[in-house]
Structure formats: structure tokens, C-alpha cells
Image (spheres, grey):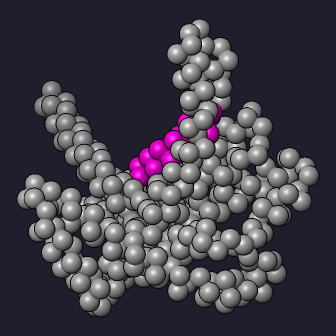
Amino acid sequence: MSGLLALMDDVAAIAKVAAASVDDVAAAAGKAGAKTAGVLIDDAAVTPKYVQGFAPARELPIIWRITRGSLFNKLVILLPLAMLLANFAPWLITPLLMLGGSYLCFEGAEKIFHVLFPHADHKVAEDMEVKDPGHLEEKKVKGAIKTDFILSAEIMTIALSVIEAPSIWIQAATLAVVGVGVTVAVYGSVALIVKMDDVGLYIAQNGRTGLGQALGRGLVAVMPWLLWLLSVVGTAAMLWVGGSIVIHGLEVLGWPWLYDEIHHLAVAFAQMVPAQFEAAAEWVATATMDGIAGLAWGLVLIPIATRIIGPLIGAVTGKSAAH
């Protein structure tokens, strides 16, 4: 009897530890998820373009294929790499974060540069040359998964940098939760977005009331504007997140000047508004200045990436590296 009671005590103790571990994972995952919000917005903004031009029946299967590729990127490739990095080369986390932040700055700046100075889109031209829909779908899915890999690497690195876990197992579990959670959030949202016009069309054609039909037509009409707004927000998020990562990285590596100047200016701006709005004003000012710095850094990177890095990658791989 005493043995059974001892066993029950052991089981209860294990259960308490497990429950505490679950709480630790949930808390850390929530904190990491909040830190990656800007990259998630960009990911959600980028993905819908990969299903444009396909039959409505192929949209959800394409998104599902990209989702599976994203989970493979995060859980099979990036999670083990992140754990090796955290436990054997933690000093590399900040430089890698800055590298990913620089990529986000480059992407955001290039989008703005393209709007201000339109030029031929080589990828669109290549897609127009592909006559086989199946081959084009395969090409689009592979391109989306490659883009996702870069964004996923940034998400996992950001998450890794803010996780304070008592053990390697909780750290790994937290990264896995973050990886699955953000993938479901991003591609679930994308699925809703790309099918919303189909939902609107169905309601417009089959609605039993004039109000319902008008609502359906409104959904169809508003979707292009929603996609445009999502693209704008995604670009702003890239510059804000990328700029803040690079600036914070410089501060961590011993060059705090820009970080300190932005902080002082944000505090000074916040003091100009009523006290109840100071925190929000300081955040907006900081995000705005981070975004401006990110845009400036991205514009510097455009010629470096397109004239030096791109051709170098093309020479190594034997393929065109045009963005």
C-alpha cells in the first residue's frame, strides 16, 4: 500500500512538473509570437500573390502545399539548426538577426523603389512564358516555399532570441509551438483572404435578399483594396521590423548611438502629448523612426544586392539571380 502511495506521489509530482512546463511553453510562445508580429504581417501580405491567376479550385490546394512546405521549413530544418545555434554558438544569434533584418529592409525598400521607379518584372515575364498550368503551379509553390524559408528563419531566430527557457526541451517545445502557431495563423488568414471574393460572389448570386446580394457585391468590390492595403501594411511592417532589428543589433554589438538617439527623440515626442497617450506616442515615434532607418538601409542595400550579391549567386549556382 505504501508503495502504491509513493508511486501516486511520484506521478503527481511528474504531473506538476509537466503542467509547469506547459505553462512555461505557453508563456514563452506568447512572448515570442508577439515579437514576430511584424514578420507575420509581411508573410501574410506576400503569399496571396502566389495563387493569383489560378482557377479558384486550385487556390486552397496551393495554399495547403505551401503550408506543408512552411511546416517542413520550420520544424524539420530550422528548429534543429536553431537549437544547435542556441546551445553551441549563441554569439551568432545577433548577427543572424541583423542579416535577416537587413533582408527585410531590402525587400521593403525594393517594393517602394519599384512603385516610384517602375521597371520590368522578370518573374512576371517568366510566368507568362509558362503555358502548362501544372508546371506553373509547381514553379509558384517552390518559389513560395523558398520565400517562406527566409521569413521562417527570421521568425524562428526572433523567437529564439526572446525565449527564456529553463531547459533545452522547453526551448525546443516553445519554438515548435511558435512555428506551428504562426504557420496556422498566416496561411489560415491567407486562405480566408483569397477565398473571400468567391464567398462574396456566391452571396451576390444566391442571396435571398437585396441586402445580402449587396453585401456579396461589396465583398467582391472591396477585396482588391484589401489586398492593396495588406501589401502596404506588409511593406511598412518589413521596414519597421527590419530597421528595429538592425538598430537593436548594433546596440548589442557595442554601437548604441542610433538606438539611443531614436529612444531620446521618441521620449521627447511622447512628452508633447497628454500623459494617457505617452506610451502609445513613444511606440509610434520609435516604430516610425525604425521604419525610416530601415528604408534608408534598404535603399543602400539595393545596388549591393542587385549588382554584387545577385550576380555572385548566379555565377555560383549557374542560374539567374534576378530578384
State the residue lying farthest toward the top: 208
Q: Nearer the viewer, residue 169 or 309?
A: 309
Quadrant containing the C terminus in the rendered view: bottom right
> Left of 255 or right of it: where is 218?
right
Q: Residue at x 29, y 55 (%)?
A: 31
Quadrant containing the N terminus in the rendered view: top left
Q: Which residues are magenta?
A: 177-197
> Left of 307 or right of it: where is 253?
left
Is 227 placed above or below 116 here? above
> Left of 103 or right of it: where is 119?
right
Q: Residue at x 56, y 13 (%)?
A: 210
Tell whether position 274 is magenta: no
Is 49 placed above or below 265 here? above
**Residue 175 point in image, percent of width and height:** 41, 57
Q: Residue at x 26, y 89 (%)?
A: 257
Quarter occupied by residue 60: top right
Quarter occupied by residue 8: top left
**Residue 158 point in image, percent of width and height:** 39, 66
Q: Residue at x 85, y 57 (%)?
A: 128
**Exactly how many numbered labels are in the figure?**
0
State the residue lying farthest toward the left: 275
Quarter occupied by residue 242: bottom left
Considering the whole magenta stretch, tell me its main secondary structure. Answer: helix
**Residue 68 point in image, percent of width and height:** 62, 47
Q: Nearer the viewer, residue 135 or 49?
A: 49
Q: Nearer the viewer, residue 241 or 75?
A: 241
Q: Nearer the viewer, residue 121 or 1?
A: 121
State the residue lying farthest toward the right: 131
**Residue 289 point in image, percent of width and height:** 33, 74
Residue 99 makes an appearance in the image: no
